[in-house]
Image (tube, grey):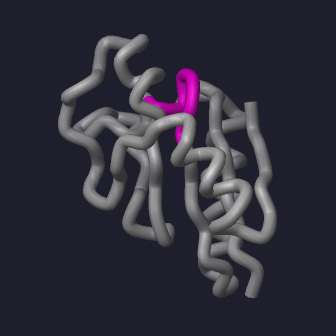
Amino acid sequence: MERIAILIGSSPTSAAARRAVALAASLADSGHPVTVALVEDGVLAAVAGSPVALPAGRFESVLALEDDLALRGVAGAPLVPGCRPCTYGDLVDLMMAQVDRTLGVF
């Protein structure tokens, strides 16, 4: 199965983000190793206890861009279990070397 990365930049309450999470879950349920990378407003889904927190346990990994966490005032906040902060370099490595396909939802 192809390894897939899904980059989500939309607010977790947006229809686009909800569709992206549903797509990621469907791909994971079909056996694809899925990494969800949260950027821009999407990082708000990484904050533990948030009413819009991402169900990170369904995916191979979940990343949240450190710079965007800081810009939104949630740097250092506990993240949902299974999620880790990442750098721009981590995202480049993910897309160029760790997955077969990357999808973006913004």
Vertical placement of residue 48 versus 98, above or below:
above
Q: Which quadrant would residue 13 be assigned to in this image?
A: top right
Observer-nearest residue: 50 or 84? 84
**Residue at horizontal 55%, vertical 35%?**
88
58 relative to 75 in the view: left or right: right
Find out whether residue 60 is within the magenta segment. no
The residues colored magenta run 38-43
**Residue at horizontal 20%, vertical 28%?**
76
73 relative to 61 in the view: left or right: left
78 relative to 27 in the view: left or right: left
Picture coordinates of residue 58 (x, y %)? 46, 69
Observer-nearest residue: 96 or 40? 96
Observer-nearest residue: 13 or 30? 30
Query: Which part of the image, by quadrant, shows the C terminus?
Result: top right
Q: Which quadrant would residue 102 be assigned to in this image?
A: bottom right
Q: Which quadrant would residue 11 be assigned to in this image?
A: top right
